[in-house]
Image (cartoon, rainbow, N blue to C red):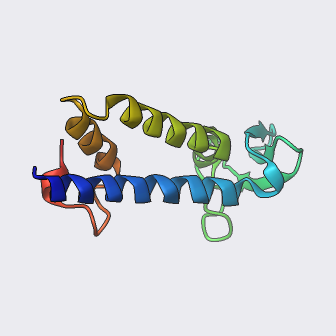
Amino acid sequence: MDDADLAALEAFVDARLDECEGTARAAGRDGGRFWDLVPHERGDGVIYDDKGSPVLRYDTDPATGLPADPSNNPLGARQAAHIALNDPGLTADWVQAQRTLLRLLHLTPAYRQALKACAEPFRAHPDCLPGWRP
């Protein structure tokens, strides 16, 4: 990988991290960063942010754990749990961790491989080049 390829990979990873951070900030409306899933016994539930505002409601068939009415609300408890776990706070912290690791590895032999590893989750992005795979 020459310097031009390295610069393009750096720009790609930086842009994807910016996108992740931007969507996390937008999702954490009014500064709410951390989400909590509150299930109800009847199979439905709500994800609340740390300010107590509802973020998302879901409805689950208690027998299957899948969405009760996918045509009306495609989210069930499994999807809601994943969404709550990947709240804006976790995403913003993950982005910061990626940037910290890249800063620590800059100018080391492992830097190029670390950049490729950071690009890997975005392999389906149209700007991701096949040579950037780890």
Residue nearest the viewer, comparing 42 with 18 = 18
**Residue drawn at point x = 83 percent, y = 40 percent:** 50
Seen at 21% across and 52% down, the residue is 6
Rendered view: 56 above or below 77: below
Residue 86 seen:
no
Q: Position of residue 67 (x, y in %)?
A: 62, 54
- Residue 87, image x and y in percent? 65, 44
Residue 31 is at least partly visible in this image? yes
Name the quadrant containing residue 110: top left
Residue lying furthest right: 52
Front one among 85 and 113: 113
Q: Is residue 16 left or right of residue 88?
A: left
- Report x, y in % for residue 94: 52, 38
Instruction: Look at the picture and state if 18 lies above or below 115.
Output: below
Q: Is residue 133 left or right of residue 57?
A: left
Quadrant where the image shows the C terminus: top left
Quarter holding residue 16 = bottom left
Q: Is residue 9 left or right of residue 66?
A: left
